[in-house]
Every structure is written in C-alpha cells, then in structure tokens.
Image: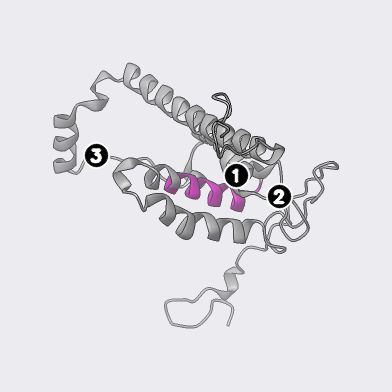
Amino acid sequence: MTHPHPDEPPGREAVTEETLAQWRATIAALQAERDSLAIVAERLAQDYDEDPNLLDLDEVEDDAEDGEASASPLTILAFDDDALAEEVRTMTPWVDHILLGVYGQEITSGRPWCARWPEHDEALARIHHCWLAWQELTDPRSGATGPSVWQRDHLEPLLLKLRSADGPFTACTTNPDHPHHRLLPALPFTDPDSLPTAGGAAAGA
C-alpha cells in the first residue's frame, strides 16, 4: 500500500497560468480597494485636522434642527475644479483595477473603452455614481446581498451604456495598442423660441 508524500497532499490541483492570472487579478482588485480606502481615509483625516469640530455630533444635530446644515453635492458634475480633481484621483485606482480590471473584459468595437474617460462628461458622471454606490453597497452594514445588488442595479447598467456601440466612447479607438481619443460633438442647445410662454404658446409661435 502506497502513501502520499507529505509534501504533496492528495487532491491538490496543479497551479496553472490561468490560476495565477486569477490570483493576480484578485490581488490587484484588493490592492485597488485598499488604495481607494486609504485615500478616502487620508482625506477625512485632513478634513478633521482642519476642523476638529467636524465630528462633533451634538453640533451637527443642532445645525440640522436649525436648518443650517449644508451638504456637499453628490454628483461630480457639480464639483468645483479642486474637488473634481481630488475626486477623480481618488476613484482612479478603483476604475483601473476593479471596474475595468475585473469587469471590463476585452476591448472591442462592440465593447469600446477610452483611457481618457475623465474627459467624457457622461462617462465621468456615470462612473462616479457607480463608484458611490459601490462604496455604500460593499460596506458590511449593507448586508450580504449588498455587492450583488450593486452588480445588478449599478454595474451592469453602467457597462451596458458606457461600452455600447453608441455610448460616449464610440468615437475613440477600440485598439489599446493604437490609442486614439476624440470627444463627440456637443449637441445644440435648446432653441429659446421653442420655450412655452405664460400664455401657453411657444415663444416663436
């Protein structure tokens, strides 16, 4: 009767290149999440250093009762230049290693992508909103179904829109070896003559 060598447990699967690639992708995703959370933590620490009363819950409650509490806008399209630059810097590791690195798949004409995505306003807004949802729904307080809800309600619609043939990246190259970036032309503004007037008719009628 033969016995397995102690250094080779029975049933142990061989490590393949595919397995190594999966491990690398998982490690990269975890590192990206760590980096994003570290940047957020650093930013919160800086805010607290600048204003030690930032976490004074009694003061926050008093302000809310007085109607004086003000909230920052959630959509990145409403950020000023400094806040915009910081927010994009914070979420870029997540975009590179989680959104594209894990879920992006191959770049083709049917699934385009643009490495200069922050310059596409629609893409920037949609990615930012998805990132905010990811932070909330991958938090342990969201429960075990949080990540699945994020994938179903936020990630999949985002990828379907961004990477469709008529999405914001449609004018950019689909070959990563030959990068090309072009913004779509701006649509015309609303014709002021088409606006209704107090009398009920259009202004130019």
Name the residue carrying label 3: 69
State how far apart marks 1 and 3 are (Cα). 39 Å
**In the depicted structure, whether residue 61 falls above or below residue 42:** below
Name the residue carrying label 2: 113
Q: Main secondary structure of the magenta part?
A: helix
Residue, far front: 1
Please indicate, yes or no, whether residue 85 appears anywhere in the rendered image: no
Front-most of residues 183 and 98: 98
Q: Which mark is residue 159?
A: none
Q: Earlier in the sequence, mark 2 or mark 1?
A: 1
Query: How many C-alpha atoms fall within 10 Å of the one at disc 3: few (<14), some, or many (≥20)?
Result: few
User: Which portion, as a residue range, is magenta?
Assistant: 120-133
Quadrant location, the N terminus: top right
Local secondary structure at mark 1:
helix
**In the depicted structure, whether residue 120 falls above or below residue 33:** below
Q: Earlier in the sequence, mark 2 or mark 3?
A: 3
Nearest to the eye among marks 1 and 3: give it. Answer: 1
Front-most of residues 1 and 90: 1
